[in-house]
Image (spheres, rainbow, N blue to C red):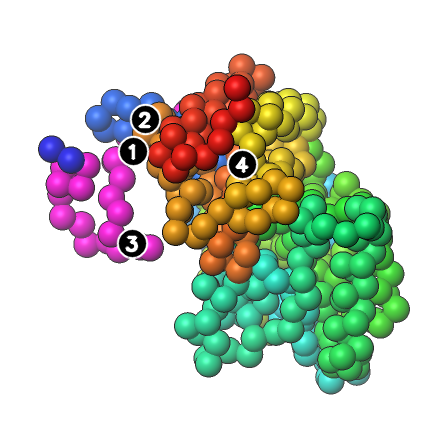
Amino acid sequence: MDQQSAHRPSNLFYLSRLRRPVVDRAEGIYLWTKDGRRFIDGSSGPIAVNLGYSNPAVIEAMKRQMERTTFAYRLHFENEPAEELATALAEKLGYLDRIFFVSGGSEAVESCIKLARQWAVATGQPGRWKVIARMPSYHGGTYGSLAVTGDGLLTDTFSDQMRVMPTVPAPTAYRDRDNLSLEERGLRYADMLEERILAEGPETVLAFIMEPIGGAATGALVAPDSYYGRIRQICDRYGILLIHDEVMSGVGRTGKFLGGDHWNCRPDIISLSKGIGSGYVPLGALAAPERIVKPVLDMGGFQHGHTYAGNPLACAAGLAILQEMDRLDLVDNAAKMGDLLLEELGGLAKRFPFIGDVRGKGLMAAIELVADSQTMQPLPASYHTNQKILDRAYERGLILYSRRVKGGVQGDYVMVAPPLIVTADEVREIVSILGDSLEAVARELDLPVAG
């Protein structure tokens, strides 16, 4: 009996009709299905389960909170877990010391955009409303976050119902074939932002939103170092807020608490999610400095909110997650295991010439697959190479993550991003299974293999 027919009928629907095995339990970096199969989570779900599964301290903290209350509406009560988590986050974020909790990444990005707009109105700049984003990029599935998402495959259907924001090219400097150094290319990509600001009219531009390290749309994209400081200079020059979307790259994932901490490019507002809830609870946050929040509150308050904002159960879990990350020194482990992961992926690139790039920071790494590593010409979209690799890995008990890196239409990558508790032996096992999967796809598509 095949997998599709083995399933009972379902009233659920999601992205497609694809059915998967029924999960039974999970622990560490592993999940087991009802039929007894074991899977290694090589992508932390959708790059979310930073702490790994079934951490006893987090589960115990959730149990303790459930015995007290699972809900307290923020307009009726304050609650200690939300206050304590906000304080713990502020201590890690420094100047970004005002926290607004939400339930997920799209809500977090939406909150950042709305805070920025209300700040502009409160400070006498109502003409500022445009949020410049990058193409390609991904910032969420709600209309506000879709409006700053650079991916036509996701946005075109809904463009008539929202105000799509202007974009600049994402800094895919590794693809360029010119006489410039990487650092010169980084400056050129940053300067494209200034050109767009001038074209739009600086007095109309509110903010620039970017992922410090690319996520779903660009597969662990890291710009040249020169890019980040120049972006900050340009935003300062025109009085524009810099928003860092740290939903995927934040909370230790890259070997720093924030992805942006790798560079001297201090944002004005950040969004967090995924790792802060680590798969235990729906949780996200906006973080901003007092200088941005104060004018908004002075004007009458933040015109925004969600039913589960600051939920005590979610915040109790979030606080325990941060405490466990500190106890286990997981940010440092992400840095060390990330170095090993990139080294091992580099070994795969020598073996498989259709790997055109290996990139990332910490445990947020990716390989990009190309037809020609000299020209970076993508593989034909009809090959569906990335999906084939995910399927072959899944058959071998390894979960990976992928989309396409050219507006969702072409350009294949595979992201490797296991939980931050991963060990060196587990990193090597993940890369070994990925290598076997690449070998199988190379035979299937007649792609070259060295040796």
What is the distance, in whole Å, between disc 2 and disc 4 at their CAs?
A: 32 Å
- At mark 3, the secondary structure is loop
The amino acid type of the residue labelled 3 equals Ser
**Residue highlighted by disc 3:** 16
Please identify, in this view, whether the residue under mark 1 or under mark 3 is nearer the observer. 3
**Residue highlighted by disc 2:** 32
Question: x, y (%) of residue 141?
Answer: 47, 62
Q: Residue at x 29, y 33 (%)?
A: 23
Residue 27 is inside the magenta segment:
yes
Q: Residue furthest top?
A: 425
What is the distance, in whole Å, between disc 1 and disc 3 at their CAs?
A: 19 Å
Please identify, in this view, whether the residue under mark 2 or under mark 4 is nearer the observer. 4
Disc on the earlier residue, 4 or 3: 3
Disc on the earlier residue, 1 or 3: 3
- At mark 2, the secondary structure is strand
Question: Cβ–Cβ below 8 Å for labels 4 and 1?
Answer: no
Question: x, y (%) of residue 450?
Answer: 53, 24
**Residue highlighted by disc 4:** 354
Which range of residues does the magenta coloring cover? 3-30
The amino acid type of the residue labelled 1 equals Val
Q: Quadrant of residue 138?
A: bottom right
Quarter holding the N terminus? top left
Question: Cβ–Cβ below 8 Å for labels 4 and 3?
Answer: no
Question: Cβ–Cβ below 8 Å for labels 2 and 1?
Answer: yes
What is the distance, in whole Å, between disc 3 and disc 2 at their CAs?
A: 23 Å
